[in-house]
Image (cartoon, helix red, strand yellow):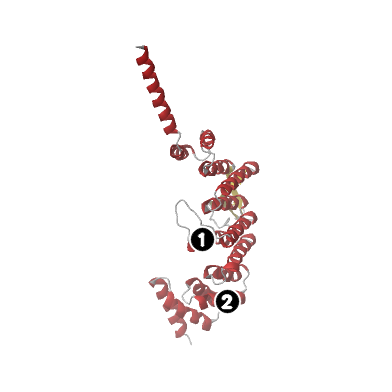
C-alpha cells in the first residue's frame, strides 16, 4: 500500500513537472505576452513580471528584450493636448479649432510628452536587442521610430540613426532579417523613404533638413536612385523655392526614367506657378502619356487642350 502511494505520488510529481516545463516554453511566454498586451497594453499590470520570468528562463532570446523596450517606451509616454497658432502640427490636422473673442483661431492637437529617464531606459533595451541580432532590421527601425516620436520636430538623433543604418547596409552587406517580410533592396529603399516622407510632412525647417540629409546619404551610395533624386528636387522646389536647382534634379530623374510621374507632376506644377506656358505644355504632354491612371491622363489632356486653344 505504501509502495503504491509513493508510486502515485511520483507520477503526480512528474506530471506536474511536465506541465510546468510546458508552460515555460518560449512559445508559451510569447502567447501569454501577446494575450496580456491585448488586454492591458505593453506597459500594463503584470507585463514586467512576465518579462522578468521570460528573460530568466531564456537569457539569449531577443523577444523579451524587445518587449522590455516596448514596456519602457510605452511607460515613458503621457498623452496631452497642445494649442497652436498653426493649423498643422508635425503634418497632422487639428482635432479641434476654436476662435477667441477677437476671432483669432486656435488649433488643438494631440501630442505626447516623454519622461526622459524612462525613455532613456527604453533606448538601452532596444540597443541591447540590436547587439543581440544586429541584422534584424525591424529592431533598428523600432529604435528610429522611438527617437522620431521623442524628438518630434527636431529629429537629429533619428536622422543619425537612419544614416547609420544606410551606412551599415552598404559597408557590411548584411543578410537582413525581418519577422514578416523578405528584405530586398526595394524594401530597404521604401523603408528609408517612409521616414523621408514623414520628415517632409512636418513642413518645418528641421523636417526639411532631415529629409535632405537622408536623401543625400542614400544618393552618396546609389547616385541613380530616382526616389531620392526626386526627393532633392522636392527639397529645392518646396523648401528652398529654388526652381532652377529643383529642375536639374527632376530632369536627371527623367533621363533615367522618362515615365517618372513624381518628376513630371512636379515640373507641371512648377511651370504652371511660374506662368511658363511653353514648359508647362512640355511636361503636360509627358503626363498625358505617363499619367498614373486614366483620370490623371485625361485631366492633363484637358489642360493641354485649353493651353493650346489660347492664342
State the residue at coordinates (41%, 29%). Answer: 18
Which residue appears at 54% of the width and 58% of the height? 174
Q: Nearer the viewer, residue 117 or 128?
A: 128
Q: In the shown orientation, is residue 123 left or right of residue 178?
A: right
- Report the Cα–Cα distance between label 2 and label 1: 27 Å
Q: Is residue 114 left or right of residue 263?
A: right
The residue labelled by disc 2 is: 247
**Residue situated furthest front in the rendering:** 3
What percent of the width, then of the height, locates residue 139?
Answer: 54, 50
Question: Is residue 120 visible in this depiction of the protein?
Answer: yes
Left or right: 55 in relation to 205: left
Please tell me whether mark 2 sits on a helix, a strand or a loop: helix
Give the foreground label among 2 and 1.
1
For the residue pair 310 and 74, the one nearer the viewer reads as 74
Q: In front: 232, or 20?
A: 20
Vertical position of residue 74 compared to residue 4: above or below: below
Between disc 2 and disc 1, whose residue precedes? 1
Measuring from the top left, give residue 162's x and y in whole percent.
59, 58
Residue at 39 percent across and 16 percent down: it is 6
Q: Quadrant of the N terminus?
A: top left
Disc 1: which residue: 188
Q: Is residue 73 above or below residue 85?
A: above
In the image, residue 179 above or below residue 226: above
The quadrant holding residue 92 is bottom right
Q: Residue 175: x and y, percent? A: 51, 57
Dot 1 surroundings within 10 Å: few (below 14), some, or many (20 or more)?
A: some
Dot 2: few (<14), some (14–19), or many (≥20) neighbours within 10 Å? many
The mark found on residue 110 in the picture is none
Question: Which residue, as the protein is rendered here, is positioned at the far top?
Answer: 1
Amino acid at each position: 500500500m505504501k509502495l503504491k502511494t509513493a508510486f502515485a505520488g511520483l507520477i503526480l510529481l512528474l506530471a506536474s513537472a511536465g506541465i510546468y516545463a510546458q508552460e515555460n516554453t518560449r512559445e508559451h511566454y510569447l502567447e501569454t505576452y501577446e494575450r496580456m498586451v491585448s488586454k492591458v497594453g505593453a506597459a500594463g499590470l503584470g507585463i514586467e513580471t512576465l518579462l522578468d520570468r521570460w528573460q530568466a528562463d531564456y537569457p539569449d532570446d531577443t523577444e523579451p528584450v524587445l518587449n522590455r523596450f516596448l514596456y519602457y517606451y510605452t511607460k515613458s509616454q503621457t498623452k496631452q493636448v497642445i494649442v497652436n497658432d498653426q493649423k498643422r502640427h508635425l503634418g497632422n490636422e487639428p482635432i479641434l479649432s476654436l476662435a477667441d473673442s477677437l476671432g483669432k483661431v486656435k488649433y488643438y492637437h494631440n501630442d505626447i510628452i516623454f519622461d526622459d529617464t524612462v525613455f532613456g531606459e527604453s533606448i538601452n533595451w532596444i540597443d541591447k536587442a540590436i547587439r543581440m541580432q544586429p541584422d534584424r532590421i525591424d529592431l533598428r527601425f523600432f529604435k528610429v521610430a522611438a527617437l522620431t516620436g521623442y524628438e518630434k520636430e527636431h529629429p537629429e538623433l533619428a536622422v543619425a540613426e537612419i544614416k547609420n543604418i544606410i551606412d551599415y547596409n552598404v559597408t557590411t552587406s548584411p543578410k537582413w532579417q525581418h519577422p514578416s517580410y523578405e528584405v530586398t533592396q526595394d524594401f530597404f529603399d521604401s523603408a528609408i523613404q517612409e521616414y523621408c516622407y514623414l520628415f517632409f510632412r512636418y513642413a518645418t525647417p528641421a523636417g526639411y533638413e532631415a529629409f535632405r540629409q537622408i536623401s543625400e546619404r542614400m544618393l552618396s551610395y546609389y547616385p541613380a536612385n530616382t526616389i531620392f533624386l526626386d526627393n532633392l528636387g522636392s527639397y529645392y522646389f518646396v523648401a528652398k523655392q529654388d526652381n532652377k536647382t529643383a529642375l536639374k534634379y527632376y530632369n536627371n530623374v527623367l533621363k533615367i526614367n522618362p515615365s517618372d510621374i513624381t518628376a513630371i507632376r512636379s515640373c507641371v506644377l512648377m511651370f504652371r506657378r511660374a506662368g511658363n506656358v511653353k514648359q508647362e505644355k512640355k511636361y503636360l504632354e509627358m503626363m498625358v502619356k505617363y499619367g498614373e491612371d486614366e483620370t490623371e491622363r485625361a485631366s492633363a489632356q484637358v489642360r493641354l487642350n485649353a493651353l493650346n486653344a489660347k492664342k
